[in-house]
Image (spheres, rainbow, N blue to C red):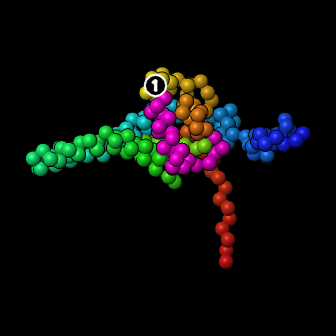
């Protein structure tokens, strides 16, 4: 069989499209590790509410500051209110990007609920993935109503629609098997 440049390098013998290597099994199996997914949806709801408060506090403080600044400057400072609308979009995206892409792979609410976001292969999240996660979540809930969250009840990994699209999974951090640490070198 000749290579026609399509990127498919294997047959049905365990190789995958474009990778040329064997297909990797998912890192988190809901049948072998059910404790990783037990109670995740309920915890995600509470984590979302906590994150909503964390996101709202700087916005509320900024509005109060602009209002007081407007009073002090006899109305001139109120011209800064135009910054509030773009800030209420940019700030949450940066918050999710930095927190999900940070060392904990979790937002403040997720850490309080002992949750962690991982990719489907088990690797930690990164900044762009965290930003995309926030954008897709808000878009799916806005356009498809909150009933889209029912998707989490229909799969073993308790993934929501945006998790499925992005290839992410939210797990119980405490139930995650501890990775073996490589032995340190002694010099």
Q: Residues within 10 Å of mark 1 (few under 14, many from 20)?
A: few
Q: Residue at x 79, y 46 (%)?
A: 21
The residue that mark 1 highlights is 143
Picture coordinates of residue 127 (x, y %)?
Answer: 51, 49
Quadrant holding the N terminus: top right
Q: Which residues are magenta?
A: 120-140
On the picture, is 148 further left or further right than 80?
right
Residue situated in front as seen by the camera: 1 or 101: 1
Picture coordinates of residue 145 (x, y %)?
Answer: 45, 23
Image quadrant in which you'd find residue 88: top left
Magenta-drawn stretch contains 19: no
Picture coordinates of residue 169 (x, y %)?
Answer: 58, 38
Q: Residue at x 51, y 39 (%)?
A: 133
Residue situated in front as seen by the camera: 18 or 104: 18
Image quadrant in which you'd find residue 54: top left
Picture coordinates of residue 80 (x, y %)?
Answer: 23, 46
**Residue 114 seen in render:** no
Quadrant holding the C terminus: bottom right
Residue at the left extreme? Answer: 74
Q: Residue at x 60, y 43 (%)?
A: 119
**Residue 122 seen in render:** yes
On the picture, is 122 further left or further right than 87?
right
Residue at the front extreme? Answer: 4
Mark 1 secondary-structure assignment = helix
């Amino acid at each position: 069989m000749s290579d026609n440049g399509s990127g498919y390098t294997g047959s049905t013998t365990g190789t995958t499209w474009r990778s040329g290597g064997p297909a990797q099994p998912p890192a988190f199996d809901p049948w072998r590790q059910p404790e990783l997914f037990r109670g995740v949806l309920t915890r995600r709801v509470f984590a979302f509410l906590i994150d909503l408060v964390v996101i709202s506090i700087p916005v509320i403080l900024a509005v109060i500051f602009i209002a007081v600044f407007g009073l002090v400057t006899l109305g001139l400072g109120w011209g800064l209110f135009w910054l509030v609308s773009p800030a209420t979009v940019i700030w949450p995206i940066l918050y999710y990007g930095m927190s999900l892409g940070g060392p904990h792979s979790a937002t403040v609410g997720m850490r309080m609920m002992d949750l962690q976001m991982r990719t489907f292969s088990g690797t930690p999240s990164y900044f762009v993935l965290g930003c995309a996660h926030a954008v897709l979540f808000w878009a799916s809930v806005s356009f498809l109503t909150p009933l889209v969250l029912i998707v989490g009840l229909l799969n073993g990994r308790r993934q929501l629609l945006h998790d499925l699209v992005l290839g992410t999974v939210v797990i119980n951090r405490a139930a995650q098997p501890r990775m073996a640490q490589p032995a340190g070198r002694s010099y």
